[in-house]
Amino acid sequence: MFFLRSHYRHPEFRQGAIDALGVAPGLAAWGLMTGVAMMKSGMSTFEALLMTLTVYAGSSQLAAVPLLTAGAPMWVILATACCVNLRFVVFSAHMRPYVMHLPRWQRLVTGYLTADLSYVQFTKRFPHVGSDAAHRRAQQAYLAGNCGVNWVAWMGCSVLGVVLANFIPTHWGLGFAGILALLGILCSLASSQLRLVSAGVAGAAAVAAFALPFKLNILVAIAAAVALCLILEETRRPQQEQA
Amino acid sequence: MSGSTDLWTLLIIVGLAAVTVLTRSFFFISSKPWKLPHWAQRGLQYAPIAALAAVIVPEMVMTQGQFISTWQDARLFAVAAGAAWFFWRKGAGQAVLGTIVAGMAVYLPLHLGLGW
């Protein structure tokens, strides 16, 4: 976490921050438009600020806001947010071995602060769990630097969006910069043929299953892509062993 | 400050924050020793890119839940420009930043200028 001295003094903290700075403009534009969207939906300034500062999850905020202003029951709103956030449950299964040496409260804070981009950049830089205490500290320092920059970029611009909502028309489409940031990260992950297959299958499945409620198309797409890649990996293996 | 604030909405917002904490640290909560099955561990190397594609592809090729029926859409050209930049730079340095800038440099004129 970025507020721990032992983390921000570590050289990996800087590296994590630099990697995050590369995607920060996209995140900032996306945060800005999330702030604007909350205000345009009719939430009060206080509600929008509280949501920005506590929820810290753009996709679940954007899914919850229309339900909130339409007066949907609480359980529907929370269930929707859970479904939109299900991908984070998958991420937490992946991240578990990296954080289990920490006390529980630090694990929870780390999880809370690790959004999509930090998860992706972290697992890209560290494909394997640190084998000793020094490695593990370096990994946590990187994550802290990365999450810290993302937090500042997102929060700063989201609050700005709430304050300036009346001056920034949504039809400018500035939020598309967030999609481009995710596109850049996706390109940097496309390091093998099977990963390209995974991206293609997931993208097509997410479009095909778009009509599902609660954004469940995202989870269906992940499941379909991962399952297909595992099967392909299995069928390719004998050929590779012969070669 | 604008709008009226009601307590029920605040409660829901606190609930949403709890959902963020719970989902993001779901598998961090228990301290019991436990390992993912081997197949799931292998599967996880395909999960991040799948999650990203699942989030962004609908945002690129759909409008209001419908597949777009025209090629005159600024998003398609922006995505092409952004990806082209990334692979031209071979992903080195701040290639992601370049992807965002190149993409928006194509997107904004087409979107605001031509209304695509």
Image (cartoon, coloured by chain):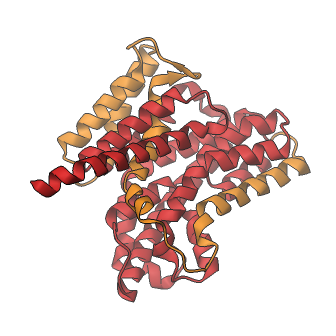
Circle count: 0
Residue projecting furthest to the bottom: A133
| Pick the front one: A19 or A84 | A84
Quadrant (top left/top right/bottom left/bottom right) for the C terminus of chain A: bottom left
Above or below for A28 versus B84: below
Q: Which chain is orange?
A: B
* Residue in the picture at 36% in, 50% down: A230
Residue B91 appears in the picture as rendered:
no
Tell me the shade of chain A. red
Q: Relative to residue A184, is residue B51 drawn left or right?
A: right
* Residue in the picture at 45% in, 80% down: A7
* Residue in the picture at 81% in, 40% down: B2
Percent of width and height locating residue B65:
58, 23
| Pick the front one: B107 or B27 | B27
Residue projecting furthest to the right: B7
Percent of width and height locating residue A195:
31, 47
Percent of width and height locating residue A76:
79, 42
Percent of width and height locating residue A33:
58, 38
* Residue in the picture at 60% in, 80% down: B32
Q: Relative to residue A115, is residue A80 drawn left or right?
A: right
| Pick the front one: A219 or B105 | A219
